[in-house]
Amino acid sequence: MSSVLVEDADKRLVTYGSDGSFLLWELDPDRWITLACATANRALDSDEWPELRSDDVYDPGCLAKGDDRSADALMQTEGAPL
């Protein structure tokens, strides 16, 4: 990694590698939940929740009931993936 930029407004970290690659890292834990649900295409269960938000009370409601959008569509709507 040759450069790092922290974007406070969007809570993201951007890294630039010596190979010319850029990586976007989400720093907002709420965004981690949204992306995890989008990737799984379902709400997280009570066993999965502590892996992302161990200090918070379980809240499975990251995808609205009846929300049939695909993970790709949700991530495009919500922003860039991890």
Image (tube, helix red, strand yellow):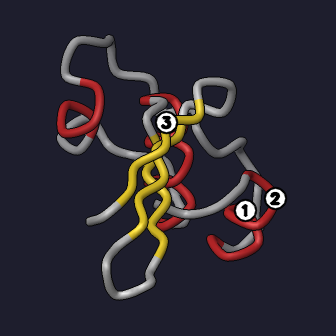
Q: Are the two marked residues, 1 and 2, in contact with CB atoms closer than 8 angstroms?
A: yes
Name the side, left or right, on which 68 lies relative to 2: right
Instruction: Identify which residue, 47 or 23, lies in the foreground.
Output: 23
Q: Is residue 59 above or below residue 13?
A: above
Give me the residue at 38% from left, 56% from top: 3
Q: Which quadrant: the N terminus? A: bottom left
Name the residue at 76% across, 72% down: 73
Bin the neighbour count of mark 2 within 10 Å (Cα to Cα): few under 14, some 14-19, many 20 and up.
few
How many angstroms separate mark 1 from mark 2 (CA)? Answer: 5 Å
Q: Residues within 10 Å of mark 3 (few under 14, many from 20)?
A: some
Mark identifier at residue 57: none
Q: Please give the residue where the numbered disc 1 appears in the rendered image.
A: 74
Q: Residue at x 31, y 64 (%)?
A: 2
Q: Residue type at mark 1?
A: Leu
N-term-proximal mark, 3 vs 2: 3
Of the numbered discs 1 and 3, the one sitting upstream in the chain is 3
Please, is residue 25 above or below residue 20 in the view? above
Within 10 Å of disc 1 (Cα), the crowding (few <14, some 14-19, many 20+) is some
Residue 6: assigned label: 3
Q: Which mark is residue 77?
A: 2
| Dot 1: element | helix
The picture places residue 20, in percent across and down from the top left corner, at 44, 84
Above or below: residue 22 compared with residue 7: below
The type of residue carrying mark 2 is Thr
